[in-house]
Image (cartoon, coloured by chain):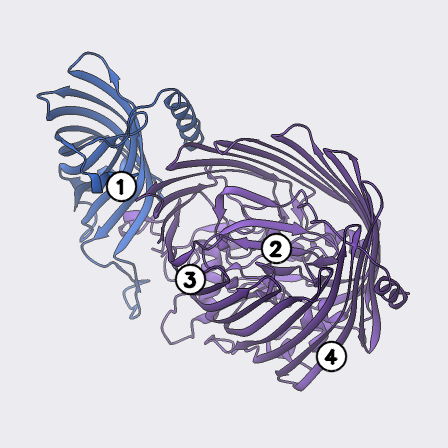
């Protein structure tokens, strides 16, 4: 899977070099609601809430760069005191195809770090008489990648709304995989000079 | 004979051009981190813990005399019992060029006897500048939230890092000042290695100590140059709570390491043709006690003092260098009280243009320490055309036993470390010097302005070679226990090394490189043949860099190395190891004395921000997630992900 992802990265970048646009002229800020619609066996043991994503994106020479953070809470189900918060911080690159003046479709890839923060610190007891339990770390994190497809509709010159589908995978000991459906709104701003300097 | 050669050279005249980098060197737009020194260059290596490395050189393999490490032309002492810890290389900023050279020779005026790894760090900008970097990495297969499933529980581990470097520098026309502070913290993500370390450092009845290692390093360097005089002074101090892989024990030993040193180097132009070079090195290494359940303690303190001076003459047709050096080492350790070694050396090199495009080169170093050690070589460089250079060289190398794994020498002098670590040993009463004959041919062909081909063939004939052999036995708790350690002296045999590389670059936007290396033992004694089976016979590396836009860099690479056989570990072949502490349910693995072939694919991307002041780097290693290990008890590396941020002002 990862090998295929790598090949995909190369293939996606090559056509992107053929044409160029002015990078970072504008930037979009938005908020998205995320709903987990499918996943692997990890979802059997936790109740998950809808998530929220805060995102920034901007046109690059070709395609769009984005940086975002997605928050999801997982409530304990099978195991006591096992609730945790999930924060996926990522950067991504999307390549929009303009279908009409107002409507575009953009496949993209995202990579980032998936942080898991446990509500309670787990102690592992070897048996009932164990007086020196092993204490686990409260925080865990791991690389995660995501592929997605976004369809976006331009509401006005400054506002856009989008519906997306994405597949996210975190290769922890037992891989953590889920598929999201998302709905969001973004506002477009002209990039101030100081911000252009920072991102270039 | 070598004395005669040195004197001969001293009375001859001539000059040299800069030597071309050999095929197994690395240079690219993507600068190399200290920790990636081996993984991103073409050098063969093995690593037990991904922090310290043993590099291959064709003179002594993985053991014996180690390559000299140079940073911006000055020696760096980053070896600990033969293991190189790249974190002790005090580069302020990233490394922009790595050059590996085999065999005997001179790097500037500084002699090396078993190869050299020469590093150049990024150039300082004018005025006041600062550099900082921080990184953290993690690895596929870590636990995640499943810690709550008692059937599938795995220990929740930290990762490599954070590792942070901070450097403040100043540069004017004829003066510069560098300073560096480095803090690196790491806990092995390989559960088997972690368990081994924890089992040693955790005292029964006490806390279950984490096997964290912490390195700190500080460096100040100042340099001044005028038309006639150059001067550099460098001071380094480092300390760490660390684990050293000690070969006679067959596993890691907890140790507190301290390192300090001052290096002064200068050269002065006497007149148009003559130059005087001077080098002074004073260093101290300490291997002290770090809490562990077996009371392992190296308790070894070493002071080193080295003075070197050479006189160089350059003319249009060649060069001459003659010099003298003195090195002394003082050891304090159990069984060794102020034990001192002293070595004087006569140095010489000579190059003369015989006719247009053909040069003769000769080099020698004759060392005096109880007996005489002769190292000398002679060679011819020829420009077969404007774009085709060829070089042939033959030489003899004699190595002092102190370089043949310094613990062997110290144990013979009375150091009681084998007793302290409960190692049985069969040692000869005396260790004779090692002797090798070398012959190599290098070619460099410029096929076009952007395409270059490099090849190298070398034969090394070991006339007398000492081989350490440590059979490792199986132990359920510790995984490994030492058998009887032996130093097998006087082995003979012949080796062949071949390598080739093709470099292609299309301006600054694209570059690519294909490197292939092959080595084999032609003949030799049984122990000799067994020793070299630890070296992968084949390795192939391919890398390609792409810089589509000014602020974006992409690089991908693939690396193949063939399988290796470690006869020392036959005693644990097929035995199980536990990948977790006994406190929680373990998973199991199997030791093998044969390390399988491996193909690794890596990719990284970097984006600059703020007009190239800030760089965010994402590195992915071993994308196919096939477990890689370079040593039978070394870390099993899976897919690794590194996040790195760099700032420079």
Disc 2 crowd rating (10 Å Cα; few below 14, some 14-19, many 20+) is: many
Label 4 element class: strand
Tell me, yes or no, if residue B521 can be seen here.
no
* Residue at position x 66%, y 70% in the image: B278
Looking at the image, residue B68 sits to the left or right of residue B439; the answer is left
Whole-number angstrom distance, CA of label 4 to CA of label 1: 59 Å
* Mark found first going from the N terminus, 2 or 3: 2
Q: Quadrant of residue B572?
A: bottom right
Q: Which chain is indicated by disc 4? A: B
B417 in relation to B517, above or below: below
Same chain for mark 2 and mark 4? The answer is yes
* Mark found first going from the N terminus, 4 or 3: 3
Proximity of marks 2 and 4: CB atoms separated by less than 8 Å: no
Residue B328 point in image, percent of width and height: 69, 78
- Which residue, given by chain and number where applicable, does mark 1 sit on? A197
Q: Which chain is indicated by disc 3? A: B
Disc 4 crowd rating (10 Å Cα; few below 14, some 14-19, many 20+) is: some
Whole-number angstrom distance, CA of label 1 to CA of label 2: 37 Å
Label 3 element class: strand
Please tell me the colour of chain A.
Answer: blue
Task: Kindly report which numbered mark, 1 or 3, lies closer to the viewer in this rendering.
Answer: 3
> Split into 4 quadrants, where in the image is the C terminus of chain B?
bottom left
Disc 3 crowd rating (10 Å Cα; few below 14, some 14-19, many 20+) is: some
- Which residue, given by chain and number where applicable, does mark 3 sit on? B170
> Split into 4 quadrants, where in the image is the N terminus of chain B?
bottom right
Please tell me the colour of chain B.
Answer: purple
- Which residue, given by chain and number where applicable, does mark 2 sit on? B118
Label 2 element class: strand
Residue B385 point in image, percent of width and height: 77, 32
Same chain for mark 1 and mark 3? The answer is no
Between A71 and A133, which is closer to the camera in this rendering? A71
């Amino acid at each position: 899977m990862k090998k295929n992802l790598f090949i995909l990265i190369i293939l996606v970048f090559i056509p992107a070099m053929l044409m160029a646009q002015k990078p970072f002229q504008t930037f979009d800020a938005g908020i998205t609601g995320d709903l987990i619609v499918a996943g692997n066996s990890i979802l059997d043991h936790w109740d998950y809430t809808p998530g929220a994503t805060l995102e920034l994106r901007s046109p690059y020479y070709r395609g769009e760069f984005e940086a975002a953070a997605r928050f999801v809470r997982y409530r304990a189900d099978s195991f006591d005191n096992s609730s945790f918060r999930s924060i996926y911080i990522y950067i991504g690159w999307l390549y929009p195809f303009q279908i009409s003046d107002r409507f575009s479709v953009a496949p993209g890839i995202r990579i980032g770090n998936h942080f898991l923060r446990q509500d309670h610190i787990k102690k592992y007891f070897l048996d009932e008489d164990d007086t020196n339990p092993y204490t686990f770390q409260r925080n865990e994190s791991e690389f995660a990648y995501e592929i997605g497809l976004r369809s976006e509709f331009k509401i006005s010159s400054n506002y856009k709304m989008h519906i997306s589908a994405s597949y996210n995978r975190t290769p922890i000991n037992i891989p953590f995989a889920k598929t999201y459906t998302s709905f969001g709104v973004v506002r477009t701003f002209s990039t101030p000079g100081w911000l252009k300097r920072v991102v270039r | 004979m070598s004395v005669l050669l040195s004197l001969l050279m001293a009375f001859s005249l001539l000059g040299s051009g800069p030597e071309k980098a050999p095929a197994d060197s690395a240079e690219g737009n993507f600068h190399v981190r200290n920790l990636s020194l081996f993984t991103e260059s073409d050098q063969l290596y093995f690593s037990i813990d991904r922090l310290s490395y043993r590099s291959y050189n064709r003179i002594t393999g993985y053991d014996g005399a180690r390559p000299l490490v140079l940073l911006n032309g000055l020696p760096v002492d980053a070896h600990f019992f033969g293991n190189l810890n790249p974190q002790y290389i005090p580069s302020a900023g990233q490394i922009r060029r790595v050059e590996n050279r085999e065999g005997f020779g001179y790097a500037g005026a500084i002699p090396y006897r078993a190869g050299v790894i020469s590093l150049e760090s990024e150039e300082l900008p004018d005025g006041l500048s600062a550099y900082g970097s921080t990184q953290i990495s993690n690895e596929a297969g870590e636990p995640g939230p499943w810690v709550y499933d008692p059937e599938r529980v795995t220990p929740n581990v930290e990762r490599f890092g954070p590792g942070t470097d901070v450097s403040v520098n100043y540069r004017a026309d004829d003066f510069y000042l560098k300073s560096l502070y480095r803090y690196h913290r790491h806990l092995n993500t390989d559960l088997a290695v972690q368990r081994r370390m924890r089992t040693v450092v955790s005292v029964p009845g006490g806390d279950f100590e984490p096997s964290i290692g912490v390195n700190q390093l500080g460096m100040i360097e100042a340099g001044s140059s005028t038309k006639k005089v150059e001067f550099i002074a460098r001071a380094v101090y480092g300390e760490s709570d660390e684990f050293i892989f000690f070969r006679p024990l067959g596993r890691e030993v907890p140790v507190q390491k301290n390192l300090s040193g001052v290096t002064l180097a200068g050269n002065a132009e006497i007149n148009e043709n003559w130059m005087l070079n001077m080098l002074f090195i004073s260093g101290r290494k300490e291997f002290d006690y770090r809490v562990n359940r077996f009371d392992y303690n190296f308790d070894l303190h070493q002071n080193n003092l080295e003075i070197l001076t050479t006189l160089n003459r350059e003319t249009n047709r060649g060069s001459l260098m003659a010099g003298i050096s003195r090195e002394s080492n003082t050891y304090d350790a159990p069984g060794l009280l102020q034990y001192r070694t002293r070595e004087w050396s006569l140095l010489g090199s000579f190059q003369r243009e015989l006719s247009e495009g053909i040069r003769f080169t000769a080099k020698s170093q004759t060392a005096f320490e109880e007996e005489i050690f002769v190292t000398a070589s002679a060679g011819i460089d020829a420009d077969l055309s404007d774009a085709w250079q060829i070089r042939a060289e033959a030489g003899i190398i004699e190595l002092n036993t102190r370089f043949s794994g310094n613990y062997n020498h110290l144990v013979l002098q009375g150091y009681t470390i084998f007793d302290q670590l409960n190692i049985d040993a069969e040692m000869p009463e005396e260790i004779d010097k090692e002797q090798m004959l070398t012959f190599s041919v290098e070619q460099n062909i410029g096929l076009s302005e952007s395409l270059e081909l490099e090849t190298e063939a070398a034969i090394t004939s070991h006339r007398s070679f000492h081989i350490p052999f440590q059979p490792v036995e199986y132990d359920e708790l510790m995984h490994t226990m030492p058998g009887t350690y032996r130093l097998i002296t006087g082995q003979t045999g012949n080796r062949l090394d071949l390598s080739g590389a093709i470099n292609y670059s299309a301006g600054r936007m694209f570059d690519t490189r294909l490197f292939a290396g092959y080595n084999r033992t032609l003949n030799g004694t049984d122990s000799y043949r067994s020793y070299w089976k630890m070296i992968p016979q084949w390795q192939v590396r391919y890398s390609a860099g792409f810089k589509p836009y000014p602020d974006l860099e992409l690089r991908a690479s693939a690396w193949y190395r063939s399988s290796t056989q470690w006869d020392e570990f036959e005693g644990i072949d097929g035995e199980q190891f536990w990948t977790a502490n006994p406190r929680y349910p373990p998973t199991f693995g199997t030791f093998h004395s044969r390390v399988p072939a491996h193909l690794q694919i890596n990719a990284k991307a970097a984006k600059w921000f703020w007009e190239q002041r800030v760089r965010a780097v994402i590195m992915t290693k071993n994308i196919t997630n096939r477990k890689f290990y370079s040593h039978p008890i070394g870390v099993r590396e899976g897919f690794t992900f590194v996040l790195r941020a760099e700032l420079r002002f």
